[in-house]
Each structure stands twice: as C-alpha cells, then as structure tokens.
Image (spheres, helix red, strand yellow):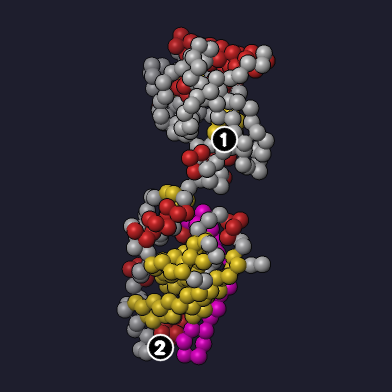
Amino acid sequence: MLCGESVRKILEVLRGLLWVSLTKENGYPLPRMASSKPFFDDIRSKPEVIDPPQSEEMMDIGESVNDPVQSAVKPNVVVSSSVHELLECPVCLNAMYPPIHQCSNGHTLCSGCKPRVHNRCPTCRHELGNIRCLALEKIAASLELPCKYQSFGCVGIYPYYSKLKHEGQCSFRPYNCPYAGSECAVLGDIPYLVAHLKDDHKVDMHNGSTFNHRYVKSNPHEVENATWMLTVFSCFGQYFCLHFEAFQLGMSPVYIAFLRFMGDDNEAKNYSYSLEVGGNGRKMIWQGVPRSIRDSHRKVRDSFDGLIIQRNMALFFSGGDRKELKLRVTGRIWKDQ
C-alpha cells in the first residue's frame, strides 16, 4: 500500500507522462529550457519540484547520440524533479533499480540498503517485509536519461535501466590518476591528468619516442622501500607512462618496467614498445603493447606484463661489488602500421 505522499507523486508523474504523450500525438511542440546544464548528472542534487502538466520548465535532452549502441537521434525526453525524488533512495541517495522495496506505508528504498537498515523502514521504522513497488519500477522503465559523463563529452541518451551499464563502459568516463607512488584519488580527462602529474606529483616529462633511463638504489635488498619511478613521454600526439619499481614475487624480490598508454585500450593497441637492460656483455629485451591506464597499475604489475628482472640478475648487470643497483633501461615506442 502506498502512502498519500507517494500516491500524489506517482499520480503527478503519470499525469506528466500522459500530457507529454498527448502533446506529441497532436503535433504540439514540447516546451524547452534555455539552460544547457546537464540534468540528472549528480543523483545527489535536488532540483526544484516541477508539475509537468502546468509548468513549462521542462528539460529537452534529445541529442544525436555518438555511441555504437545508441546511434539514432532520440526523441525529446522530459523528466521532472518529481521523478528524480521518487527514484532516489533515502538511505544512500543513489538511483534505485529493481527490486525497489517499500514498507506498508509506501516509503521506498533500494535493495542494496534494505539489509543495512535491518528490515526496518528508515522513514517510519515499520517492518519492510518483501513488498515491491512495481508502479515505481514501471515509471523508471519509461524514462530515458543522459549519461552522467555528459560534461566530459558524452551525448548519449539511455533507458533508465541501461544507463548504469553504459556509464560503466562509457568512453568519456574520466580516468584515474596513473601515479603509483601514492593512493591518489584524482579523476579527470587526459589533458587534466597530464597537468596534474606534472604540477602535483612533479613527474618528469619528456618529448620523443625513445628513452634511456638510469635507475640507482643504494640498498637493493630493501624491496619494501623501493622508489616508485614514473616518467611521462609525449609522442605521436599521445602520452605514455613508463613505470619502474621493485616488488616481491613469491620469496624473491624482482624489478619490473612496463609502459601504460594514457587513453583507452582500443587506442593502446595501435602502439608497441620495447625495453632493454643489460651489462657485462649480457642483455634482456622485452617487446609488448602498452596497457591502457584504465587497467590499474597494480593489475598490470601483478600480471607481469613487462620487463621483469630478478634481483641477482639486476645486480649482475650493475657490476661492481653487487651492493648497489645501477640499471640502465633503454627503449622506444612506435606506432603500428
């Protein structure tokens, strides 16, 4: 059973959807808003409540969709803030997806938060039981909304229940900072991250597709305290991150060098790179494809996708009394034809 307030809101939403349908059937234009701000970008924002049949403060978010899955131009989509409020979980403040639960008084919450409130309605404290709010689920199924990464360039319009999946794969979603020496939580597009690495992490920036780096460590036996090294290269109009570090592989400490591409995986596959390290008349060579920074630094490292050098071999390459690590790593990046 729905409470009076929930009934009022659902009737308001249904009345708005019916009004839109009748307006289209009779050939009348839908009202537009002059504002270009992305709607529903942040599920935590609470816009002013709008009554669809009486107000012209509607948002037309019909766009030409630049997405392989959504390639056609979508019709006008009208979403009022009443829908926004109905679909917002009162506990986590995120959008709700089926099954949407309700108490006997009609208060709703998402399935993820139901165990967290110990089967008690967070609004009225009544027992929740296993009542689903099918009416609200059907309203959600009728909606089409813009991607939350609209401000990053995505112009796609998606059904409510498909939006979350798209956003998890959207090519416009921001990247995590690729710096591995700290748990940096910065997100952004590539130009922003390049400036962030240079200004905030003081990362070395180099132009060109070849490199010749020397890594020195006075106590190579202290793997836990090994310095995380990151250098950014700019070539072919793209940016690449060269990582070098020590880590424990089983009982043995090893060194690893690998390259990551600052972009998506489908672009990374257009490039290749080689790494070479040696000394005392011996050398090791690695050739591979750079991994996208969509893959975390740890994921790439733990898959051993790079030049791996055992500590004994690294010290052999270093020469001398083997008490100091002195490695010279050379390499180049090229674009595959």
What range of the chain is rendered magenta?
278-296
Quadrant position of the C terminus in the picture = bottom right
Residue 179: x, y in percent? Answer: 40, 59
* Mark 1 or mark 2, whichever is nearer to me: 1
Residue at image location 45% in from the left, 54% down from the top? 191
In the figure, 317 relative to 306: above or below? Answer: below
Camera-side residue of 30 and 20: 30
Which amino acid type is shown beneath numbered disc 1?
Lys
Residue 321: x, y in percent? Answer: 35, 89
Badge 1 marks a residue whose secondary structure is helix
Camera-side residue of 293 and 206: 206
In the figure, 214 relative to 175: above or below? Answer: below
What is the C-alpha distance between the residues marked 1 and 2? 57 Å
Residue 137: which quarter of the image?
top right
Badge 2 marks a residue whose secondary structure is loop
Residue at image location 58% in from the left, 37% down from the top? 156
Which amino acid type is shown beneath numbered disc 2?
Gly
Residue at image location 37% in from the left, 80% down from the top? 325
Residue 259: x, y in percent? Answer: 50, 66
Q: Write down the residue under mark 1.
A: 163
Q: Is residue 116 visible?
A: no
Neighbours of disc 2 within 10 Å: few (<14), some (14-19), many (20+): some
Residue 232: x, y in percent? Answer: 44, 65
